[in-house]
């Protein structure tokens, strides 16, 4: 499943949870799933991810030139922009943000608000509460820019800053966000007037920037939603924990330190990470840097019977994709096929719910090329579902023939190392790719009937 601004990965090594990192909300058994309900999620939920990657919108590279232990600090050896006075003013602003970040990490709300004007404090109070609920462990603001005067607001300045942040796990490779800050200079001291979502961050607005959050923390997953939907957290966390254990099996490199899942109501769905998804979307994964992906579920359109396989699919993207995303649309079948395989969770092939769409795709004149199966932006529901089904069946055939580990090795070679399938198949499988490709397609046709 996926997203418009897209994913990455090789996450940091997992850490053993401590007592302080266990669930805030008790984990209760997830409610029984309805049976016989047709999944609604395999459409743009997954498609958004792939298309965003191909387009190159990969927020995970925002701090590519910053060392992980100095996120937000200016890159060594690069000449800073602006005049000396502008650079000095930027440094004073970042000093204020450093003070605010230190207060955030030690749980000092008064200190967090102290750098701000009274008008900014209500929004900052909400942000403080959301970040504390998410168990923020790292908050490193910095900038390589200089302040710009705000038109029509004498004495006010705007500065875009980059923040490296971690939740739950201390010392992680930070995720990153670009934030717009507005300031008023009083004597020598800059005073924070507002923190605005950055206009330049391709990932869009993070939930903790704009909404109150209720959060449940488990050993492998965090689940967050609005206070109005707090009662759903125990069941969602139980399901996310189970999906995380499944997704860990498909990690290419160390598994993510934590999987973060947001459960969005109607208004939040339109606001978080830029909104704008088609109405049938049930969820997506979006890269946020540091080898990490946030997953968003749509409370309005997600059928109860689809929650578990949707979570397995999305979290498998988070576990398997590289930091840079994937650049070749020809790899779509492999990326989505692996996630569909994880979502299916070992069920018999004849129970895969997309077989009817695969049959329609085969009858519609598909070329029979895996590298050409990715659906167009305006594809019909059947065409999209059929494409995911082809990916699933092709990956399933490779797993049945070679085992999961060798398929993950093939995935690493093709998607992470960007090697041609011909070269990767020779090395990993010991068989020529043209023949394997044709075997996969033959299996798709046979399985679909």
Image: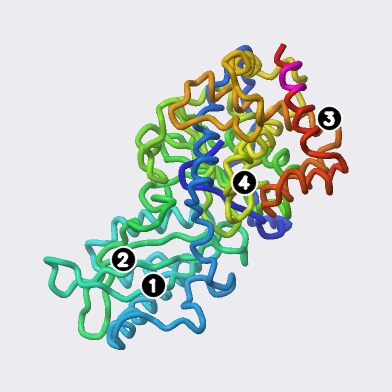
Question: Dot 4 corresponds to which residue?
Answer: 318
Q: CA distance from mark 4 to mark 2?
A: 30 Å
Question: Dot 1 corresponds to which residue?
Answer: 97
State the image coordinates of residue 30 (x, y, percent, origin top left). Answer: 63, 28
Instruction: For the residues labelled 1 and 2, say whether their Cβ atoms are less than 8 Å apart.
Output: yes
Kindly report which numbered mark, 3 or 4, lies closer to the viewer in this rendering: 3
First along the sequence among labels 3 and 4: 4
Front-most of residues 100 and 431: 431
Residue at image x 23%, y 65%?
Answer: 118
Kindly report which numbered mark, 1 or 2, lies closer to the viewer in this rendering: 2
Q: Is residue 307 above or below residue 263?
A: above
Residue at image x 73%, y 54%?
Answer: 253
Residue 128 visible in the displayed image: yes
Instruction: Check residue 443 for magenta coloring.
Output: yes
Question: Dot 2 corresponds to which residue?
Answer: 181
First along the sequence among labels 1 and 4: 1
Q: What segment carries the magenta color?
A: 442-446
Q: CA distance from mark 1 to mark 4?
A: 30 Å
């Amino acid at each position: 499943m996926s997203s418009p601004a897209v994913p990455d990965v090789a996450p940091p090594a997992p850490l053993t949870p401590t007592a302080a990192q266990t669930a805030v909300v008790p984990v209760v058994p997830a409610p029984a799933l309805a049976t016989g309900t047709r999944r609604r999620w395999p459409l743009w939920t997954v498609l958004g991810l792939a298309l965003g990657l191909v387009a190159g919108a990969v927020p995970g590279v925002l701090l590519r030139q910053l060392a992980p232990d100095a996120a937000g600090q200016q890159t060594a050896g690069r000449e800073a922009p602006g005049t000396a006075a502008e650079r000095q003013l930027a440094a004073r602003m970042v000093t204020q943000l450093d003070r605010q970040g230190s207060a955030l990490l030690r749980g000092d709300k008064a200190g967090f608000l102290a750098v701000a004007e009274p008008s900014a404090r209500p929004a900052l109070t909400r942000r403080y509460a959301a970040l504390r609920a998410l168990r923020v462990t790292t908050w490193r603001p910095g900038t390589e820019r200089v302040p710009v005067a705000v038109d029509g607001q004498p004495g006010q300045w705007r500065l875009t800053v980059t923040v490296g942040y971690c939740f739950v796990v201390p010392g992680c490779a930070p995720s990153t966000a670009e934030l717009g800050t507005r300031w008023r200079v009083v004597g020598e001291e800059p005073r924070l007037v507002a923190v605005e979502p950055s206009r330049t961050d391709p990932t869009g607005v993070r939930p903790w920037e704009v909404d109150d959050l209720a959060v449940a923390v488990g050993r492998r997953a965090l689940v967050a939603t609005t206070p109005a939907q707090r009662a759903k957290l125990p069941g969602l966390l139980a399901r996310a924990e189970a999906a995380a254990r499944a997704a860990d099996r498909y990690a290419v490199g160390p598994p993510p330190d934590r999987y973060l899942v947001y459960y969005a109501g109607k208004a939040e769905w339109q606001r978080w990470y830029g909104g704008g998804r088609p109405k049938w979307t049930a969820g997506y994964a979006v890269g946020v840097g540091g080898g990490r992906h946030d997953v968003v579920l749509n409370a309005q359109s997600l059928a109860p019977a689809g929650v578990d396989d949707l979570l397995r699919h999305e979290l498998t993207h988070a576990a398997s994709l590289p930091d840079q995303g994937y650049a070749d649309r020809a790899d779509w079948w492999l990326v989505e096929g692996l996630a569909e395989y994880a979502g299916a969770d070992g069920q018999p092939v004849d129970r895969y719910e997309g077989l009817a769409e695969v049959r329609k795709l085969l009858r519609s004149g598909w070329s029979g090329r895996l590298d050409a199966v990715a659906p167009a932006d305006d594809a019909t529901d059947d065409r999209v579902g059929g494409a995911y089904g082809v990916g699933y069946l092709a990956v399933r055939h490779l797993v049945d023939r070679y085992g999961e580990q060798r398929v993950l090795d093939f995935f690493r070679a093709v998607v992470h190392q960007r090697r041609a399938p011909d070269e990767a198949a020779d090395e990993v499988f010991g068989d020529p790719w043209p023949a394997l490709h044709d075997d996969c397609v033959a299996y798709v046709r046979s399985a679909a009937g």
